[in-house]
Amino acid sequence: MRFRHRAAAGFATLLLPLAGLVGLASPAQAATTATATYAKTQDWGTGFEGKWTVKNTGTTAISSWTIEWDFPSGTSVTSAWDADVTSSGTHWTAKNKSYNGSIAPGASVSFGFNGAGSGSPSNCKLNGDSCDGTTVPGDAAPSAPGTPTASSVTDTSVKLSWSAATDDKGVKNYDVLRDGKVVSTVTATSYTDTGLTAGTDYSYTVQARDTADQTGPVSGSVAVHTTGGTTDPPPTTGDKVKLGYFTEWGIYGRNYNVKNLVTSGSAAKITHINYAFGNVTNGQCAIGDSYADYDKAFTADQSVSGVADTWDQPLRGNFNQLRELKAKYPNIKVIWSFGGWTWSGGFAQAAANPTAFADSCYNLVKDSRWADVFDGIDIDWEYPNACGLSCDTSGAAAFKNVMSALRSKFGSSALVTAAVTADGSSGGKIEAADYAGAAQYVNWYNVMTYDFFGAWDAQGPTAPHSPLTSYSGIPKAGFTTADAMAKYKAIGVPASKLLIGIGFYGRGWTGVTQDAPGGTATGAAAGTYEQGIEDYKVLKTSCPATGTIAGTAYAHCGSNWWSYDTPSTIAGKMSWAKSQGLGGAFFWEFSGDTSNGELVSAISSGLS
């Protein structure tokens, strides 16, 4: 019962800056440790498919691999799989995924791509040596510089100094990174960064470049807090959770970036963010959209820090923007949510080996590139031992077993949460899985108290999609917030571990003549992104509320009938949540709100 608007499959992959490959000669001589060879596997005139294969020809296992090559201008790749590929001009680098870095002696792994153009790869290197297995002399990357030290800290500047890196050909210069982004390239081993904001936290690292323009590893980091000024105070939240979903695909058609949380004022009024979604496939947690997650370069005006991303900074995309947001609002915790309506089918295989699944999730969430971004993991399984987009038959204990394994792996200090059904009907989804048994392992449940009713029932009856309580004529008993919360509490889930859910959108029908709920319809009302659904920010003016029922609003305009929450109904729901002793509230999702965040404000003030 949850709205999802996924970007088209493969969209992000098409945007990755890869390059096409055609024809690479066979190895010139026998390899001593490993080789990398290329083959064109298909050619359809306007494009082609290619494959790189890395083979371990040594006697010990290889733990990771990196292939580098050059391409002539005009050759490009439109998508790739089983490797992370980046580019700098005509130079390309492919690194293994988390699941295929290890290669046993005599074994091999491959990654493929679709490409365009007619150029051939040249100057191939595998882990710094020639792709035919021979050593490339005198071509090592520089070492990491010493961790910078900070001095002369003022309201707007800081002086940084570090010990020199070493390189076989000599160090050419150093990149200075502020909060993961290059702010200057210098030849000396010191730099004064200016134009900073008073009373603000920053993190600095340094990396060296040699005369071949190879970049070495990043140094350790130094934290700097500029003097003077005042930072935005943490919101007055009491002990209530105020959590919003940020969707990875919102940066595309919706053009909603992490920075919008700042400009709307919402970042100062929340405690947690769920980043949606990571995928669940092959029994493992996996990246959902690599381009959006960690590759997209944001311009200065799109960036939380106001500094544009560069091609060679260690982390870009939404993950880096969330890092910048946390630097500005250190009270905010970010949780990576896996699954969702579209990707919940993968949980059946995950539940077959919960320990292996938990291990994969931990390794991904705690990846060194973004470990500081995430404070925990959220599981959005729709629905364990019940039906959603597909039907699950993992058994009543599967959900508890998965949450137990995640808590065991992530430890007591991490946040482990889950989005769960709000089906409070007799014999409904709450009864299908051991939510009571799993509650001991979670910090809280996000109870999805919305999408109870909608235009999937094309002829109606019209009904509010997020009723707080029951009412005369409700289409299905138990489909209310109050019923769901009462059932969870009755089976032993503490009220403090239950969050009420708010939808920042409406659901609607067309062909409706009756103003009050219960009318007939002819189908779904038109929506910007999907039939039968529309953002609150649009509906508040296009179809203003004409009445309320069961604690939520409805609107009848022309032949359309919509239901949605307003600041007023949210205030009522927050008051009810507090009276029930609930742990707080969450909402789906930020981009449905107005540009000044009026729904977030209603949640925040209602729980304070």
Image (spheres, rainbow, N blue to C red):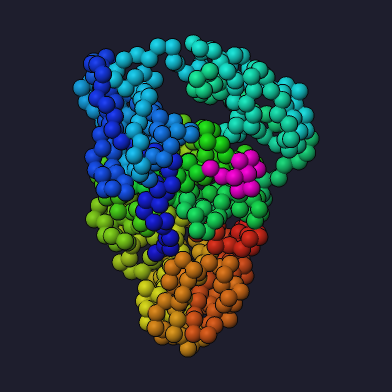
The answer to whether one can see residue 40 in this image is yes
Q: Indicate the position of residue 219 as horizontal and vertical percent values.
A: 55, 22
Q: Indicate the position of residue 117 as horizontal and vertical percent values.
A: 36, 42
At horizontal 24% and vertical 28% (from top left) the residue drawn is 108
At horizontal 25% and vertical 52% (from top left) the residue drawn is 394
**Closest to the observer, 453 or 61:** 61
Q: Indicate the position of residue 2 as horizontal and vertical percent values.
A: 42, 62
Q: Is residue 307 magenta?
A: yes
At horizontal 40% and vertical 52% (from top left) the residue drawn is 11
Q: Is residue 534 above or below residue 491?
A: below
Of the 4 image quadrants, the one containing the N terminus is bottom left
Q: Indicate the position of residue 58 as horizontal and vertical percent values.
A: 25, 16
Of the 4 image quadrants, the one containing the C terminus is bottom right
Q: Is residue 234 magenta?
A: no
**Closest to the observer, 431 or 303:** 303
Which residue in the rendered view is the most extreme toward the left? 106
Q: Is residue 583 above or below residue 192?
A: below
197 left or right, relative to 528: right
On the image, which quarter does residue 151 sit in? top right
Type of secondary structure dominating the magenta stretch? loop
In magenta, the rendered stretch is 297-308
Which residue in the rendered view is the most extreme toward the bottom? 513
The answer to whether one can see residue 361 in this image is no
**Closest to the observer, 378 or 59:** 59
Count numbered badges in the picture. Answer: 0
On the image, which quarter does residue 553 sit in? bottom right
